Image (cartoon, rainbow, N blue to C red):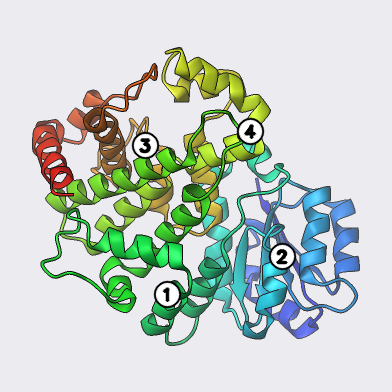
Amino acid sequence: MKRTILFVDDDQHILDGFRTLLYGKRKEWKCFFALSGKEGLKQLEREQFDVVIADMRMPGMDGADFLKEVELRQPGAVRMILSGYSEMKAVLKSVRHAHQFLSKPCSTEVVIETIRRVTDLKHILNNEQVRAIVTGLQALPAMPDIYIQIERELEGCEPDLKHIAKLVEKDVGISATLMRVVNSSFFGFYQHITSPAHAVALLGVEALKGLVLGVHLLSGMKAPIAGYSFRKLWEHSLQTAYFAKVIAMEESSSDSFVEGCFIGGILHDIGKLVFVTQMAEAYQPVVDQARKGGGPILSIERRELGVSHAEVGAYLAGLWGFGKGTVEAVFGHHAPDPSSREFSMACVVHVADALQHEISDSGGGYIFPTLDMDWLDVVGKSDRIEIWRDACRKRLEGE
């Protein structure tokens, strides 16, 4: 089935350019174009859209107000804002209503890749039940300002790590967490890192983005469900990320693989944030059953809600633009894809998550997920479990 895409921009030349350059995608995507927010609303009356991309600065109805209407009329559409560097305040106004941000000038290749990313993760983003829950929520977790600014810096012709470091320094909470993370024994640097600029360079920008989201979304919020602690969820997520890094470094020399595993560890439980903050009433029975030992929380979620935090979290990670490997790590951190015979980020995060619960001995009445030894046999890694367990324990003892 073709995906439907709506472009809204008051510049006819920009629309014509997209129309011409996207002609080659006509077998995959059915593209529509509107010269104003008002015209875009008429298109919404005639067609259901999978993706809506709107320019920020338009006369009459700007992109933020238009996407607000899209959210009301077609909550299932993925919403993106296209904006210039001088429009930061206006962009921040649209945070609540947009899933992703694209900077102008924006190449067709970037637009195509962004659309492809949110439409090609079919087993995740095309799960209509997950999609209906996530995009139909009153508000997705808001992207922090610093995250948007880092993204915009990275989209420039020559991204400046020093400028990114200065952005990080302005946020005391994120800066402190960043320094604690890079000086952790899990990273194993021989020198003490004292400069945020040095920390950013060592951690990697993608890992920094994951860390920024984790700190912003999980470490400082108060949960509306009695007794539910986002602080503990953040500690578990960060330690899982540490374990994932240790395991990945035991098995791979690829910096991008190790970084992706670290990000997957940070974000693997992000779906719980959505359930707790946006669906507290529906999620309360899930938490109650889990506390009484009613089974692994994943099973209870699927029984009570029809979807799990793994699927919802992966959907969010995909919308936020994280790589396919990281998205699949979030999706499969409890139950990796049995058809895959490759040692993947999903495998690493699955093991890291299970080992964190095992080694930390969280206690209580919860039944935590265990290692999928059959799947580890399939990927030829079952004999590595003790090595990974010992490596994680040693690093943890060094903290």
N-terminal of the pair, mark 1 or mark 2, is: 2
Does residue 122 show up? no
Q: Position of residue 35 (x, y in %)?
A: 84, 74
The residue tagged 3 is 333
Instruction: Mark 1: give few (<14), some (14-19) or many (20+) Cα within 10 Å.
Output: some
Q: Position of residue 218 (x, y in %)?
A: 48, 47
Residue at 29% across, 60% down: 180
The residue tagged 4 is 129
Q: Circle 2 sits in a helix, a strand or a loop, which is it?
A: loop
Cα distance in 3D space between marks 1 and 2: 25 Å
N-terminal of the pair, mark 4 or mark 1, is: 4
Amino acid bearing label 1: Glu
Q: Quadrant of the N terminus?
A: top right
Instruction: Mark 3: give few (<14), some (14-19) or many (20+) Cα within 10 Å.
Output: many
Amino acid bearing label 4: Gln
N-terminal of the pair, mark 3 or mark 2, is: 2
The residue tagged 2 is 94
Q: Nearer the viewer, residue 280 or 17?
A: 280
N-terminal of the pair, mark 3 or mark 4, is: 4
Does residue 300 show up? yes
Residue at 37% across, 83% down: 162
Q: Position of residue 240 (x, y in %)?
A: 30, 43
**Residue 169, labelled with which disc?**
1
Amino acid bearing label 2: Ser
Cα distance in 3D space between marks 3 and 2: 32 Å
The quadrant holding residue 137 is: top right
Q: Nearer the viewer, residue 224 or 345?
A: 224
Q: Circle 3 sits in a helix, a strand or a loop, which is it?
A: loop
Instruction: Mark 4: give few (<14), some (14-19) or many (20+) Cα within 10 Å.
Output: some
Cα distance in 3D space between marks 4 and 1: 40 Å
Q: Circle 1 sits in a helix, a strand or a loop, which is it?
A: helix
